[in-house]
């Protein structure tokens, strides 16, 4: 089953602020989530039990999976120091 992608408004803004090379790397990883929403290396967040994260260098993509609608919602994208705040 292939999942659709949605970005929150804040995730879209955070993505646009990144440099082009990092945007490409994030796009590749996020696109791969459509096929496998729980890839090796993804972790469930303790503070928000329905959210997961994937790593791309020093950056993190926080997302949640809506199984009923078959959608992955990208919630935040940011540097590891700031994304969990």
Image: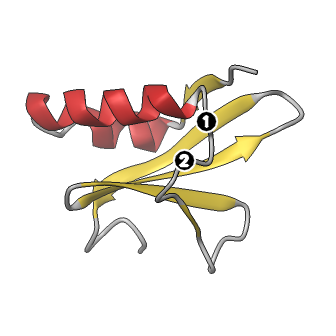
Q: Is residue 34 above or below residue 74?
A: above
Q: Residues within 10 Å of mark 1 (few under 14, many from 20)?
A: few
Q: Residues within 10 Å of mark 2 (few under 14, many from 20)?
A: few
User: Going 43% across and 43% down the picture, which residue do you hit?
Assistant: 10
Is there a contact, CB below 8 Å, between mark 1 and mark 2? yes
Instruction: Locate residue 5 relative to residue 59 in the image: left or right.
Output: right
Which numbered circle lies on residue 23?
none
In terms of depth relative to the viewer, which is nearer, 40 or 54? 40
Q: Name the residue under label 2.
A: 39
User: Going 62% across and 79% down the picture, which residue do you hit?
Assistant: 47
Where residue 7 sits: x, y (%)? 52, 32
Q: Mark 1 points at which residue?
A: 36
Where residue 33 sits: x, y (%)? 54, 34
Where residue 16 sits: x, y (%)? 24, 32
Where residue 84 sits: x, y (%)? 42, 72
User: Going 44% across and 51% down the picture, which residue do you hit?
Assistant: 76
Residue most extreme to the bottom: 46
Q: CA–CA distance between discs 1 and 2?
A: 6 Å
- In the picture, residue 11 is in which quadrant? top left
């Amino acid at each position: 089953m292939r999942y659709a992608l949605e970005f929150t408004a804040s995730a879209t803004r955070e993505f646009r602020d990144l440099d082009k090379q990092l945007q490409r790397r994030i796009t590749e990883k996020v696109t791969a989530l459509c096929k496998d929403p729980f890839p090796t290396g993804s972790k469930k967040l303790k503070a928000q039990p329905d959210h997961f994260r994937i790593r791309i260098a020093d950056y993190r993509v926080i997302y949640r999976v809506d199984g009923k609608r078959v959608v992955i919602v990208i919630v935040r994208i940011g540097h590891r120091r700031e994304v969990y705040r």
